[in-house]
Image (tube, rainbow, N blue to C red):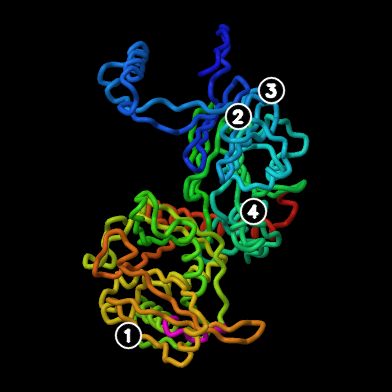
């Protein structure tokens, strides 16, 4: 380290050991929390050695030789180390947690002496504008102190009781964190099972959004997980403010929980124990979630590291696409399904989906149907489960590496999206897809037409026939609920120019309600566990009925 190291004392760890490392959102800075009460800030500016003078190169190689590097290892060293550009030395004890804000302009840090400090980046100079910074949006939430995590601390607890905390990256429905009280229910619910009390999701306390996230408040909230000295992993609603906050508690560790972190897609929580030296993987069940693959991946010509359609714009497109374009009234269509005596359940299901898709394509009763409620949209630029596979079938286009996860308000909305926006039955029933009975769709965008174009559309017949080889422009009629004025909006499909590898085949979206990155073994295991849970609860209800009807003297 750049500063002078303290003398080594037998039986005592060196105070300059690092407790936490955190990269800034823009990737330029690395903050390190140390045991000598400091936060060092390093700039991530790698400089090629061959761009430096020969004397600097020889000096660097001699330093590596003294450290015991072999000639082969020295040859592989193609860059200079990180450069230290700042230091925050205002803490009075070891720094344990660090968070960057979304603009990479500030950091906040907590120490073992229960201090919460804010500092500028990259200088590391402390700032006392705590009220303004407490309302900023932070890229991560791993600091165990602050108003947003006030309720994770039980009454009478010590400052060292909670060791770690982490927040989900996206919002989830309000019943995903805790449900059921003393008799918690699993989700998804087994067939025929419903928990005690109300199971309809109701969000009585909408979470305020930060500027740039849309409306002032939205349905759904984040979830945070904590690890404490009792070996418990707890799930809270975030922000956890107020004097009391309900939570779900999970046990398994044999000692204190040293660290908890959510996975990149919030589907898993990893907890690391202390003395038990165990790593636990918890399945974080998020209801009403779908996975969308084969998103446009065209990159910019001036900067290949960036997409033509950025992540923020892609989130907006997917939110509007799934909320507005294809809608249908299932109560009207369910009674119109043609059934015959020799029709199997699979054929009946295909017929049902075909009629729903046809009604949604034509826009029947579009103005009277409400938009779907999208809780959150997360975009991932790599790691699609079916990347490089052809969809649909071997003659289709290759699936790109870009994909998304979309969370809705209710299970009914998920069923609508799965059925209307391109059901996978089109792959299992290729004849129905070839006959345009079952339909697949690419990604559409809503166009903002001028008034002159609106008048032109009102005088034209906007009906379009479905063609799987050439996706067509769609028109929808919206009515203002206040003035009653009707406007026609056009929806344009994304063609081959939006993809990095152009092809003559259209790029249909692959939409599933299960994670494509999970193996079938996991899915089968979850189904079997749900069946075991259902059988266990049935036996428990039978035993409760037996005990309630038995004479009381049998238990005296």
Q: Earlier in the sequence, mark 2 or mark 4?
A: 2
In the rendered view, tell whether residue 368 sits above or below residue 408: below
Q: Can you give x and y, in whole percent of width and height, for residue 307 in the image?
A: 39, 55
Q: Residues within 10 Å of mark 2 (few under 14, many from 20)?
A: many
Marks 1/3: CA–CA distance: 79 Å
Q: Secondary structure at mark 1?
A: loop
Place residue 92 in its image quadrant.
top right
Determine if residue 330 is in view: no
Point out the stretch of residues depicted in magenta: 360-368
> Quick check: 191 above or below 86?
below
Q: Which residue is mark 3?
A: 92
Give the alpha-carbon distance from disc 3 to disc 2, as whole Å.
Answer: 12 Å
In the picture, the disc for residue 183 is 4
Label pair 4/3, CB-CB below 8 angstroms: no
Task: Judge left or right: residue 511 versus residue 532.
Answer: left
Q: Please report whichever mark, 1 or 4, sits nearer to the chain's N-terminal start.
A: 4
Question: Of residues 427 and 87, which is closer to you in this image?
Answer: 87
- The answer, for residue 236, to whether it is visible in the render is yes
Q: Is residue 541 left or right of residue 323?
A: right
SS state under label 2: strand
Q: Residues within 10 Å of mark 4 (few under 14, many from 20)?
A: few
In the rendered image, residue 98, in percent from the top left (x then y), is placed at 59, 34
- Which circle's residue, 1 or 3, is located before the other in the chain? 3
Residue 342, numbered label: 1
Residue for point 65% across, 28% down: 111
Q: Label for residue 96?
A: 2
Answer with left or right where residue 528 lies relative to residue 541. Answer: left
The numbered mark, 4 or 3, whose residue comes first in the sequence reads 3
């Amino acid at each position: 380290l750049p500063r002078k190291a303290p003398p080594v004392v037998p039986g005592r760890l060196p105070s300059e050991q690092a407790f936490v490392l955190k990269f800034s959102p823009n990737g330029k800075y690395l903050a390190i929390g140390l045991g000598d009460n400091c936060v060092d800030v390093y700039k991530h500016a790698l400089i090629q050695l061959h761009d430096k003078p020969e004397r600097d190169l020889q000096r660097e190689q001699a330093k590596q030789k003294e450290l015991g590097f072999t000639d082969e290892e020295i040859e592989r060293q193609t860059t200079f180390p990180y450069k230290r550009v700042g230091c925050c030395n205002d803490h009075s004890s070891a720094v344990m947690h660090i968070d960057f804000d979304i603009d990479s302009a500030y950091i906040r840090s907590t120490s073992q002496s229960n201090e919460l400090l804010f500092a500028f980046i990259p200088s590391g100079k402390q700032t006392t504008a705590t009220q303004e910074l407490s309302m900023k949006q932070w890229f991560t939430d791993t600091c165990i102190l602050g108003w947003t995590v006030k309720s994770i601390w039980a009454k009478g607890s010590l400052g060292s009781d909670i060791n770690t905390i982490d927040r989900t990256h996206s919002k989830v429905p309000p019943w995903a964190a805790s449900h059921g009280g003393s008799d918690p229910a699993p989700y998804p619910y087994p067939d025929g099972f419903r928990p005690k009390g109300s199971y309809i999701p109701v969000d009585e306390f909408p979470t305020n959004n930060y500027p740039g996230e849309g409306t002032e408040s939205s349905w759904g909230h984040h979830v945070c997980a904590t690890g404490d000295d009792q070996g418990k992993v707890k799930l809270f609603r975030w922000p956890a403010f107020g004097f009391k906050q309900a939570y779900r508690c999970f046990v398994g560790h044999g000692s204190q929980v040293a660290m908890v972190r959510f996975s990149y897609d919030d589907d898993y929580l990893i907890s690391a124990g202390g003395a038990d030296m165990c790593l636990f993987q918890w399945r974080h069940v998020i209801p009403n979630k779908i996975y969308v693959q084969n998103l446009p991946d065209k990159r910019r010509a001036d900067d290949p590291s960036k997409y033509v359609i950025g992540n923020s714009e892609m989130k907006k497109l997917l939110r509007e696409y799934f909320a507005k374009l294809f809608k249908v009234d299932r109560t009207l269509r369910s009674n119109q399904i043609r059934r015959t005596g020799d029709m199997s359940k699979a054929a009946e299901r295909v017929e049902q989906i075909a009629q729903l898709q046809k009604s949604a394509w034509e826009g029947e009763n579009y103005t009277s149907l409400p938009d779907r409620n999208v809780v959150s949209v997360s975009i991932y630029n790599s790691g699609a489960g079916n990347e490089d596979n052809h969809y649909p079938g071997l003659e289709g286009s290759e699936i790109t590496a870009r994909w998304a996860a979309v969370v809705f308000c209710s299970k009914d909305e998920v069923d609508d999206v799965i059925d209307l926006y391109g059901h996978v039955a089109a792959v299992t029933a290729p004849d129905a897809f070839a006959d345009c009975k079952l339909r697949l769709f690419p990604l559409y965008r809503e166009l903002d037409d001028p008034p002159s174009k609106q008048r032109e559309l009102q005088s034209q017949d906007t009906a379009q026939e479905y063609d799987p080889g050439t996706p067509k422009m769609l028109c929808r009629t919206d009515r203002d609920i206040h003035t009653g004025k009707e406007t026609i909006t056009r929806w344009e499909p994304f063609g081959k120019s939006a993809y990095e590898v152009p092809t003559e085949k259209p790029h249909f979206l692959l939409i599933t309600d299960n994670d494509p990155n999970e193996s079938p073994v996991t899915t089968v295991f979850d189904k079997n566990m749900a069946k075991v849970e259902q059988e266990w609860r049935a036996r428990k209800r039978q035993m409760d009925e037996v005990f309630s009807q038995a004479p009381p003297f049998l238990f005296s």
